[in-house]
């Protein structure tokens, strides 16, 4: 084996080793959720009495994100609409993110609508689209009442419509 062939093989081996060192964490990041899915976790967002029937309330909470680098993004919010005093349809819990491009929506109590300030998306109080560019209703989060407290299912930013 010539010196040139030995150097070529050595450089090829080092290049392969560097690609493996860089590629393994990327592959782990992409395939990790498939191997170890995020566990279901419910977060307490307040006493049921805090939410008057017929009103929509902004709730801020700390999302127990599995991502250690989430930082300030783990401090998030959602809209809770109480439709009736009790029962399986007592609440609707909406993500604050518009289904168009993810901008935070604002509740306009006088008009009874959610409004996206970015591109003019408008949603009725039940989350259905009233106008603008969004084609899908607001994302709803699963919820439950545990004792006297409302809890929501902690989930990453939704990408598909979930049923409560």
Image (tube, rainbow, N blue to C red):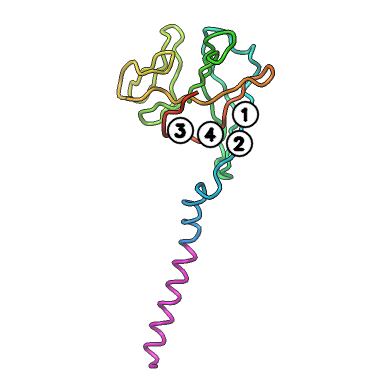
Name the residue nearer the viewer: 1 or 143. Answer: 143
Q: How many marks?
A: 4
Asked whether the beta carbons under mark 4 and mark 3 sit within 8 Å of each other, the answer is yes
Which mark sits nearer the N-terminus, 1 or 2?
1
Q: Are marks 3 and 1 in contact (CB under 8 Å)?
A: no
* Tag nearer the camera, 4 or 2: 4
Q: Secondary structure at mark 1?
A: strand
What is the quadrant of residue 14 in the picture? bottom left
Residue 43 shows which numbered tag?
A: 1
Find disc 2 in the rendering and name its residue. Answer: 64
Q: Earlier in the sequence, mark 3 or mark 1?
A: 1
Say which residue label 3 marks. Answer: 158
Q: Which residue is mark 4?
A: 155
Q: CA distance from mark 3 to mark 1?
A: 16 Å
> Disc 2 versus disc 3: distance between alpha carbons?
15 Å
Rendered view: 9 above or below 25: below
Q: Position of residue 137 (x, y in %)?
A: 39, 22
Where residue 65 appears, as percent x and y from the top left, is 57, 38
Q: Residue furthest right?
A: 147
Q: Residue at x 38, y 93 (%)?
A: 2
Q: Say which quadrant the N terminus sits in.
A: bottom left
Of 59 and 48, the residue lying toward us: 48
Observer-side mark, 2 or 3, equals 3
Separation of marks 4 and 3 at Cα, in angstroms: 7 Å
Q: In percent of the image, x 46 and y 61: which residue is there?
A: 23
Q: Mark 1 packing: few (<14 Cα in 10 Å), some, or many (20+)?
A: some
Earlier-in-chain disc, 2 versus 3: 2
Going from N to C along the chain, the mark reached first, 4 or 2, is 2
**Span of residues in magenta:** 1-22
């Amino acid at each position: 084996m010539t010196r040139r062939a030995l150097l070529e093989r050595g450089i090829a081996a080092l290049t392969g080793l560097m690609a493996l060192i860089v590629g393994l964490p990327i592959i782990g990041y992409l395939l990790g959720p498939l191997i170890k899915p995020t566990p279901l976790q419910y977060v307490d967002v307040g006493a049921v009495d805090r939410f008057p029937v017929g009103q929509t309330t902004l709730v801020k909470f700390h999302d127990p994100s599995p991502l250690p680098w989430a930082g300030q993004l783990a401090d998030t919010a959602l809209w809770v609409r109480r439709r009736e005093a009790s029962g399986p349809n007592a609440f609707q819990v909406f993500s604050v993110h518009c289904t168009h491009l993810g901008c935070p929506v604002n509740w306009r109590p006088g008009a009874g609508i959610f409004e996206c300030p970015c591109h003019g998306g408008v949603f009725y109080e039940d989350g259905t689209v009233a106008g603008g560019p969004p084609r899908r209703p607001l994302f709803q989060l699963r919820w439950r009442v545990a004792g006297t407290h409302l809890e929501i299912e902690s989930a990453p930013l939704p990408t598909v419509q979930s049923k409560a």
